[in-house]
Image (cartoon, rainbow, N blue to C red):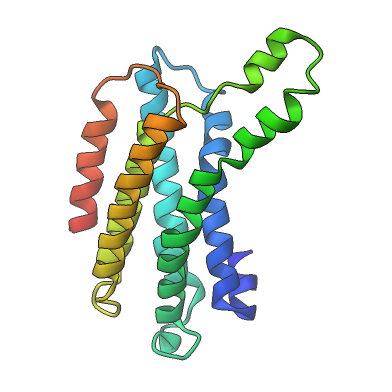
C-alpha cells in the first residue's frame, strides 16, 4: 500500500505510514489478547515489543525498500519522504492526541444513546495511559533521526521539537485526559534501554 501511494506522492505515503503507526497499537492489543500472559507486565512487554518492531520497520526501513537508491536526492525522493514524516509526526499526531476523537464520540454520541445507566457511565471513561506506547514513540523518532542523520541532518532539530512537544502534550494528557494505567514492572523500561542502544548503534 505504501509503495503504491509512494508512486503517486511522497506526502500520501507519509500519511499512510502515520495512519498505520496510529492504528498499530489497537491491532497489536487485539493480537496480544490471544496470547497467554501471567500478568499485566508480561502483556505490556509483549505488546511493546510488537509495536516497536512494526513502527521501526514501517517508519524507518520501509523507505529503503520502496525508494530506489538513485532517487535519494531527487525532488520527490527519500529526503522529501523523510521531511514529510517529520512534519506529520510534529503536527498530526499531537493534534489527534489533543482532540481525542474516540473519547468525544463516546461522550457526545454513544452516551446519550445508551440503553441504561451502566453503559452510559462506561462511555465517560477516559482512555488509559500506556507507557509502552509512549516509549515506542520516543524510540521510533530517535531511531528515525539517527538512521537518516547522514542525509538529513536537520532531523535533529525536528527531533528536538517533537520530543519537546511530546513532553508537553503527554503532560497535559496525563493530567487532564487519560486515566491511570495498570501497575507494571520494569520490563518495558529494560527493553526501552535495549532499543535506545540499538538506535544509537
Image quarter where the N terminus lies is bottom right
Q: Nearer the viewer, residue 155 or 31?
A: 155
Q: Is residue 18 left or right of residue 111?
A: left
Image quarter where the C terminus lies is bottom left
Q: Residue at x 40, y 21 (%)?
A: 180
Q: Looking at the image, is 141 positioned above or below residue 74? A: above
Q: Can the viewer see residue 39?
A: yes
Q: Nearer the viewer, residue 119 or 156?
A: 119
Q: x and y percent of residue 141 in the render?
A: 33, 57
Q: x and y percent of residue 54 in the render?
A: 46, 49
Q: Quarter-wise, where is residue 152 in the image?
A: bottom left
Q: Can the viewer see residue 48?
A: no
Q: Is residue 151 left or right of residue 50?
A: left
Q: Nearer the viewer, residue 158 or 59?
A: 158
Q: Quarter-wise, where is residue 49 in the image?
A: top left
Q: Residue at x 30, y 49 (%)?
A: 139
Q: Residue at x 65, y 14 (%)?
A: 121
Q: Residue at x 29, y 31 (%)?
A: 188
Q: x and y percent of residue 138 in the render?
A: 31, 49
Q: Is residue 1 left or right of residue 182?
A: right
In this rendering, the count of numbered labels is 0
Q: Looking at the image, is 199 positioned above or below residue 12? A: above
Q: x and y percent of residue 161 in the render?
A: 29, 61
Q: Is residue 25 left or right of residue 40?
A: right
Q: Looking at the image, is 108 positioned above or below residue 63? A: above
Amino acid at each position: 500500500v505504501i509503495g503504491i501511494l509512494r508512486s503517486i506522492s511522497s506526502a500520501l505515503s507519509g500519511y499512510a505510514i502515520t495512519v498505520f503507526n496510529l492504528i498499530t497499537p489497537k491491532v497489536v492489543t487485539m493480537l496480544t489478547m490471544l496470547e497467554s500472559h501471567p500478568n499485566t507486565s508480561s502483556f505490556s512487554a509483549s505488546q511493546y515489543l510488537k509495536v516497536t518492531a512494526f513502527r521501526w520497520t514501517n517508519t524507518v526501513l520501509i523507505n529503503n525498500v520502496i525508494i530506489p537508491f538513485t532517487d535519494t536526492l531527487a525532488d520527490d525522493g527519500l529526503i522529501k519522504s523523510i521531511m514529510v514524516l517529520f512534519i506529520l509526526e510534529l503536527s498530526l499526531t499531537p493534534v489527534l492526541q489533543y482532540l481525542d476523537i474516540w473519547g468525544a464520540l463516546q461522550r457526545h454520541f454513544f452516551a446519550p444513546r445508551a440503553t441504561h445507566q451502566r453503559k452510559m457511565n462506561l462511555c465517560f471513561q477516559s482512555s488509559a495511559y500506556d507507557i509502552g506506547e509512549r516509549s515506542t514513540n520516543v524510540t521510533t523518532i530517535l531511531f528515525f533521526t539517527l538512521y537518516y542523520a547522514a542525509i538529513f541532518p536537520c532531523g535533529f532539530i525536528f527531533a528536538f521539537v517533537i520530543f519537546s512537544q511530546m513532553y508537553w502534550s503527554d503532560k497535559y494528557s496525563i493530567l487532564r485526559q487519560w486515566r491511570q494505567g495498570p501497575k507494571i514492572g520494569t520490563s518495558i523500561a529494560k527493553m526501552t534501554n535495549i532499543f535506545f542502544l540499538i538506535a544509537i548503534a
